Amino acid sequence: MERWFGMALLVILLWGLGSLFGKLALIRDTPYRVYLFEGIGTLAVLILFVFFKKHDIFTNFSFNIYALLMGLTWGLGTIFFIIALQPAKLSVIVPLTALYPAITVLLSLLFLHERLELKEVVGIVLAILSIVLLSK
């Protein structure tokens, strides 16, 4: 198995667990306090990451606006996800919000001029179809 594929499986596992923990947290608390604790958890990971990777981070340091925008958009998206998660069923909101890769594909076609092979188009269409079916 290639390293990137193993990492992708870990992402799926961790994000799946994270969504479950988010719904469990919302059973006990308000969306805004849930986001506060989610942020504290993220900050703890960031601190460990900086501690162990400081040489890679701060050698030839330069400001990266796109990385900052990534954090801002994902952070805002997380707030809206938590707010939407409170009244919705976990089994519905997670597949529905999982449509975001379709937006990423469109943006990569428009701005990065990426090209898709037929099998990739079919895979994306099937993924979107499965998400639509799951959310019904």
Image: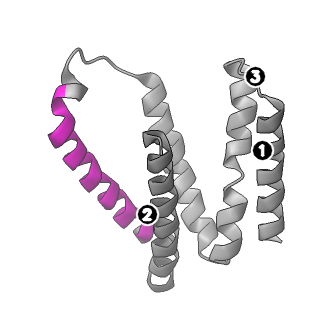
Q: Is residue 88 visible?
A: no
The residue carrying mark 3 is: 115
The crowd level at tag 2 (other Cα within 10 Å; few <14, some 14-19, many 20+) is many
Q: Which residue is at 82% across, 52% downward?
A: 126
106 on left or right of 85: right
Q: Is residue 90 visible?
A: yes
Q: Disc 3 or 1, which lies upstream in sequence?
A: 3
Question: What amino acid type is highlighted by mark number 1?
Answer: Ile
Residue 25 sits above or below residue 68 on the image: below
128 and 74: which is toward the camera: 128
75 and 44: which is toward the camera: 44
**Mark 3 and 1 residues: CB-CB less than 8 Å, in contact?**
no
The crowd level at tag 3 (other Cα within 10 Å; few <14, some 14-19, many 20+) is few
Dot 3 falls on a residue whose secondary structure is loop
Residue 126 sits above or below residue 85 on the image: above
Q: CA distance from mark 3 to mark 1?
A: 13 Å
Dot 1 falls on a residue whose secondary structure is helix
Q: Main secondary structure of the magenta part?
A: helix
Q: Which mark is residue 124?
A: 1
Q: Which mark is residue 35?
A: 2
Magenta residues?
A: 34-55
The crowd level at tag 1 (other Cα within 10 Å; few <14, some 14-19, many 20+) is some
User: Residue 41 lies in what quarter of the image?
Assistant: bottom left
Q: CA distance from mark 2 to mark 3?
A: 37 Å
Dot 2 falls on a residue whose secondary structure is helix
**Mark 2 and 1 residues: CB-CB less than 8 Å, in contact?**
no
Q: Indicate the position of residue 43 as horizontal and vertical percent values.
A: 29, 52
Q: Quadrant of the C terminus?
A: bottom right
Q: Indicate the position of residue 21 as horizontal and vertical percent values.
A: 45, 74
Q: Which residue is at 74% across, 43% downward?
A: 102
